[in-house]
Amino acid sequence: MSTFTTRCPACHGMNRVPTERVSESPNCGKCQTPLLDGAPIEGTEQNLTALLQSTQPVVIDFWAPWCNPCVGFAPVFSDVASERNGQIRCVKVNTEEQQNIAAQYQIRSIPTVMVFKQGQRVDMINGALPKGQFDQWLNSALTK
């Protein structure tokens, strides 16, 4: 049985999740908060492949802590993750900590947001958007 480790969005505890259980919406073993829905998930080399195999569309925000537009866009991304809980899975990839992922997806500017369905990229956008514009873009991307 293969597993990946993910950080709880509420208590920040690390949880090991069997890959086969990704679509079952597992809860944190410590605080019982849903691990994969309702808040952005920290994307790492250990969990991103499994997360992309989700039956739900996956939206990835590639960002860095030193990037002011990224920091400004973070609350918009978190709001969308919360509002679309159960419809999409939101993932944040810190390009400073996950340089191999950034290289794999050829991230040249941040923030970059990509939408995946069944593991395949269907759309992407560079730059931070206000919430209304991001919602419009995301609605369009999810219909592809």
Image (cartoon, rainbow, N blue to C red):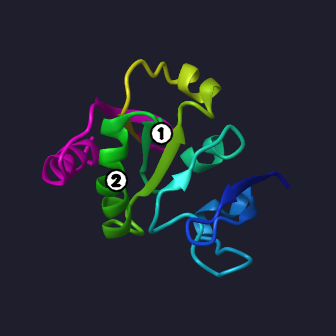
In the displayed structure, does residue 134 sit left or right of residue 45? left
Q: Residue furthest bottom?
A: 32
Residue 72: x and y in percent read 30, 46
For the magenta stretch, what is the residue range?
Answer: 116-144
- Residue at 62% in and 34% down: 97
- Residue at 63% in and 72% down: 11
Label 2 secondary element: helix
Residue at image mark 2: 77
- Residue at 57% in and 74% down: 34
Q: Residue furthest right?
A: 1
In which quadrant will I find the N terminus?
bottom right
Which of 141/91 is in front? 91
The correct choice, above or below, for 116 with respect to 95 in the image is below
Residue 143: x and y in percent read 24, 47
**At label 2, which amino acid type do we have?**
Phe
Residue at image mark 1: 65
